[in-house]
Every structure is written in structure tokens, then in C-alpha cells.
Image (spheres, grey):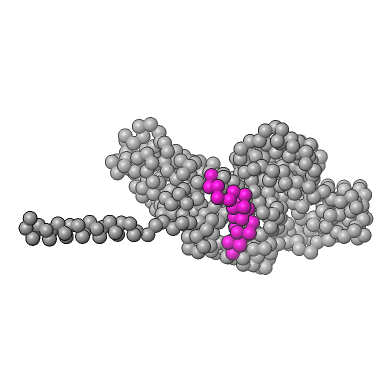
Amino acid sequence: MSQNHIRSALSTIVVIFTFLMALFTLPKEKSFLKEEEKEYAHFQPQPKNISFDGSHYSNSPSHRVLSHTRVIVEENNTKMSTLQVGAIDKFRSFSSNSSEHLSPSLQRSLQLETHPSQLMNSSSIRLSNYSAISASENVNIPVTVPNDLKRLRPMILDDFPSKFLPSYKNPCYIKYTTDKKLHCLPYFFLLGTPKSGTTDIWSKILAHPEIVAAIKEPHWWTRTSYPSAPLEVYEKRYMTNAIVKRTGTDIQKKQLTITGDGSASTFWDNMRWKEIYPEYDQKGPPYIMADVIHTVLPNAKLLVSFRDPTYRLYSDYIFFKPVGVTSPENFHDRVVTEINKFSTCLTNRSLEACAYCCKDQKVRLNIGLYSVYLRDWLKRYPRHQLMALKLEEWHARCTQLLPEIFQFLEVSSLSPIKIADICKKPSQNITSKKKWIGPMLNSTREILRDFYRPFVVRLASILNDDRFLWDYNDRQELQTEG
């Protein structure tokens, strides 16, 4: 063998050796990226056009990944095919022979197991049935937050997650820019009012093995987050830690577990709005906490517990006032004072301004204005994402209602025996007998029923359910309500 051949062979060996060394010394994936998250970490779809129920959105860095909904692919403004988006960020199936009529480039994008970003870059897309997306699913929606809304909670709305992990049922994400750890937000909210059974409902919901929570009422959105608290504090203290503690290192269990926020005040408490929007003193708040929550969690599920507002107010008065101060007569005087104040407020302010304005009340009369608050929540959330409960039925029908709640939350069903065992547990947060001061005066009851009647009728009308009339009115009046 000539020297030239030897030198050539040695050079080849050196090149191969260098290549192998480089191959084995490549940096490994960061440990915090779990297998089910690796692909998602690099997903940056840039759709040309997306429409939800006919409304088009342009490209934006703020996006969430669509999952579990029907997608209609369009090319040259012509609907070409309907596809089904799978649970783990890939198109699992699409209508038979759908690709026959598409251009070659779009056909390539519709290959089974193709990454969604390829499809989204290839053509105009229309996303239909948006309202069916569940809380854990990640929708590619550009989020533009109005400046006035940002004033309500700037630290939340300047730094909320733009996407969630598609393999998690609960809205969770990895914060790659900071700690590179799992962060979770609530999948559902248990809303309502004080003394409406939320504590007992909450305790029985948490008996389900797939539902966890740190504490029932952090009151974070309406109170603790004001004036400027980062979302990260809430995530870690109340949501993420609860999931991690329950599931440990079990990834599959972690993906199926959900958590919630049981702060009843989230439904009605917006009392800081005058400090934030003083120019709206007479009109009422332009934005409320429901706007903030919907911006961050548009697919959250909402449970709302209601109680006859007259008896709710009396129970609230007894529970929150010290022993020795309360009496039926004292309650009557306070009720008359607050009704007069509310009537005066309505002479120069809107109903919303008066309902949301009350800080220093002798009794918390405004909390019973359920229809005002429910209407505002349903302006932000579709009706099918809200389940209304009636306290007076809860205790008597727990074994029927609890499975309905679990079905609404889309967790696994429990056996009738297990449900019965949960419902047998003693009711939580019942007003102490030591605080009981006797029944309400009949005159007070009639005053309150007259005051609350139009709001109760409106509530039943909004819910299209005359069970929420209690006995304030007959069915005929409900039918005449819009």
C-alpha cells in the first residue's frame, strides 16, 4: 500500500473518530422536560387565519394549542374537510377521502401524526365548536388584553400562561423562562355566597380520588391578589403543591388529577373597583374579576351554589356577628337601614354600581343579588360551563346531585355505595347552636322577600329553572320574564 493510501485511510479514521466523539458528547435534553412534554415545548404554531364561530384572528405569539374539537380546514375560502384533533396535540383522524380534493402542499400537511404546526402554517383554518373545549385543552387564541382590564390586576394580566400542557387534564404548564417547573391553575371554581353550603359541597367533591386542593377558600382573585400579586404565588401555594403532593412522581395520575378554587367570594366580591375605576362611579365597573379569570382560564368549569337569599342573609348575620350582639330585632333594624341605603344609591347610580359598591354594611344585603352577578358571569362564560346548585336540595338529594357534579367535572364515576358513603358524612360549617338567636321576625321576612323578589324571579329566568324561585313567586311571573 502506498503512503498516499495510508495517509488517506488515516484521515478517514480521524474524521470518523471526530464525528463519533461529537455525537456522544451532544448535550442531553434538560431533565425538567418530561417525555410527554418534549414535543410540546417546541410547538410555536403561526396560523394564517383562524375563526371561532365566525370571528377571525390573526397571527400572535400568544396562543394555546387546540385539542379535542372539530377543525374545518379551508383553502381559497372553500371548506375542504373536517378533521378531529387528538388529545395529545396531533391530528388522529379526519374525514374519509378528505385529502383527495386538496392541493399537494395541504395534503402533505394532513398526513396522520403530522404536527399541528405544519397544518396551521399551510392554509387558512376555521375552528368550530370552540365552546366544547374543556378547561385543560389549549386553544390557539391570540389574547389581547384591553388596557382598562389590565388596570384591574396588572401583574396577572401581564404574565399569564399562553399555553397549557395538552396531556394534562388540569390547566398546567412549564414556565421555561424562570424555574422550569410545573405550574397549575384551577380546573374549576366553586362559586356562590356565604352560608349557601359551599363548604359542605366542597368537602364532598374532594372525596373524589381525582380531585385535590390545598385549601377551600384562598380568596386570591378577589382579595389577596390586590393590588399587585403575581400569579405564580397562587399557582404554587394553592394549586401546584396540591397536585404534586397527591400524585408524587406518577405522571399518569398527575395528568388525570384536577384541582379547584372554592372561594365563594369570587362570584360576587368586586368591591375594590371604585379605587381602580373612579371615573365609573355612577355607571358601575367596566370590568370585574370574571373578566380576569376568563382571560386566563376561558374554559374553566363553574359550580355555583344558591340559597334562599332571605334566609342566607339571616344565617350570615348570625354566623359573622359575635354572640351577645345579635338579636332578631337588631337584625330587623340593620335590614331596614341597608335597604334604604340601597334604594338611595339607585337614584343616581346603576344597579351594577350599587350591587358592587358595598363595603361597610350593617348586613351584607347585596350578596343576595344573585341575578346581577350570575348575569355578569354568563356574559363571559357560556351557559354549559356553569352548573347551578340549590342548597335546599343539596342535603336531601346529595346521592343524586354529587354524581351529576362529577359528570359535569368530567371525572370518573364512583359506585353508588361510595357516593352514599360520601353523602353520609356530617355537613360542614353549620352555624353553631350556641349562636342561634331564634327565628327571624315575620315583619323582617316580608321586607326582605319584597326586596329580593325581582332578583329571584330574574335568577330563575336566567337559569330557565323555576326551582330557583323558591316560593317568592308563581310560575306565571317567571314565564313573563324575558
Q: Judge by depth and name the residue closer to the eye, 290 or 315.
A: 315
Q: Judge by depth and name the residue closer to the eye, 279 or 379.
A: 379
Image quadrant assignment for residue 106: top left
Tell me what residue is drawn at x 46 percent, y 48 percent. Answer: 36
Tell me what residue is drawn at x 48 percent, y 63 percent. Answer: 177
Residue 197 visible in the shown view: yes
Q: How many marks?
A: 0
Image quadrant assignment for residue 214: bottom right
302 lies left or right of 37: right
* Place of residue 410 in the rendered image (x, y in percent of width and height, measured from the top left): 60, 40
* Place of residue 43 in the rendered image (x, y in percent of width and height, measured from the top left): 41, 52
Quarter holding the C terminus is top right
Q: Judge by depth and name the residue closer to the eye, 165 or 247.
A: 247
Tell me what residue is drawn at x 55 percent, y 56 percent. Answer: 183
Tell me what residue is drawn at x 35 percent, y 41 percent. Answer: 110
Residue 59 visible in the shown view: no
111 lies left or right of 384: left
Q: Is 235 covered by the magenta stretch?
A: yes
| Magenta stretch, overall SS | helix
| Range of magenta residues | 230-252
* Place of residue 227 in the rendered image (x, y in percent of width and height, measured from the top left): 64, 67
Quarter holding the N terminus is bottom left
Q: Judge by depth and name the residue closer to the eye, 224 or 144.
A: 224
437 lies left or right of 295: right
Q: Is 210 covered by the magenta stretch?
A: no
* Place of residue 406 in the rendered image (x, y in percent of width and height, measured from the top left): 65, 39
